[in-house]
Image (cartoon, rainbow, N blue to C red):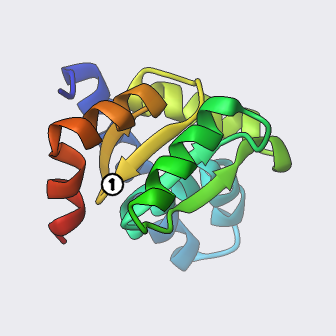
């Protein structure tokens, strides 16, 4: 369940993205603003533009487990390997603001935060994940 703080952070991130896009269309001065919010925009884009998205680290056993669970369901998630990106630490901070955790993996299905590998496994066992995957 999304707390009020998380909901406000989501709205703040969406507002930042919107302002950045508006300012970018105005002129050259906006490039600095857009660049500072690009990590937030990237995270939002990944979460809301993919059926299944995972923020992961390539060496993390819990991340590997989450990817394996989804593979067994014939799902092909969009995976962001934070340890292979220069902005991985920043992305984890955005995730902390967005979902209250900076640990990996963090799994999203159709824009809904599922959680880590234990949460994913529980969602599979309860049938919740299959319901989310069937809606689009």
Q: Quadrant of the C terminus?
A: bottom left
69 relative to 19, above or below: above
25 relative to 129, above or below: below
- Of 107 and 88, the residue lying toward us: 107
Residue at image point 17% right, 67% down: 134
84 relative to 134, above or below: above
Corner quadrant of residue 51: bottom left
Percent position (x, y) of residue 89?
74, 33
**In the figure, is residue 83 to the left or right of 74?**
right
Residue at image point 33% right, 38% down: 114
Corner quadrant of residue 65: top right
Residue at image point 14% right, 56% down: 131
Any part of residue 117 in sight = yes
| Badge count | 1
Residue at image point 39% right, 29% down: 99
Would you call the spot at circle 1 few (<14 residues within 10 Å), some (14-19), or many (20 or more)? many
- Of 82 and 121, the residue lying toward us: 121
- Say what secondary structure mark 1 lies in: strand
Give the residue pinned by disc 1: 109
- Of 18 and 72, the residue lying toward us: 72
Percent position (x, y) of residue 111?
31, 54
Any part of residue 40 in sight = no
Q: Quadrant of the N terminus?
A: top left
């Amino acid at each position: 369940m999304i707390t009020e703080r998380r909901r406000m952070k989501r709205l703040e991130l969406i507002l930042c993205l919107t302002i950045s896009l508006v300012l970018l269309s105005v002129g050259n001065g906006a490039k600095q603003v857009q660049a500072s919010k690009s990590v937030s925009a990237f995270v939002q884009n990944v979460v809301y533009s993919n059926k299944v998205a995972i923020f992961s680290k390539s060496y993390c056993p819990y991340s590997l487990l989450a990817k394996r669970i989804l593979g067994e369901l014939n799902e092909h998630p969009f995976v962001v390997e934070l340890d292979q990106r220069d902005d991985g630490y920043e992305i984890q901070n955005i995730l902390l603001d967005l979902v209250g955790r900076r640990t990996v993996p963090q799994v999203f299905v159709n824009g809904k935060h599922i959680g880590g590998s234990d949460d994913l496994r529980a969602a599979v066992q309860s049938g919740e994940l299959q319901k989310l995957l069937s809606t689009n």
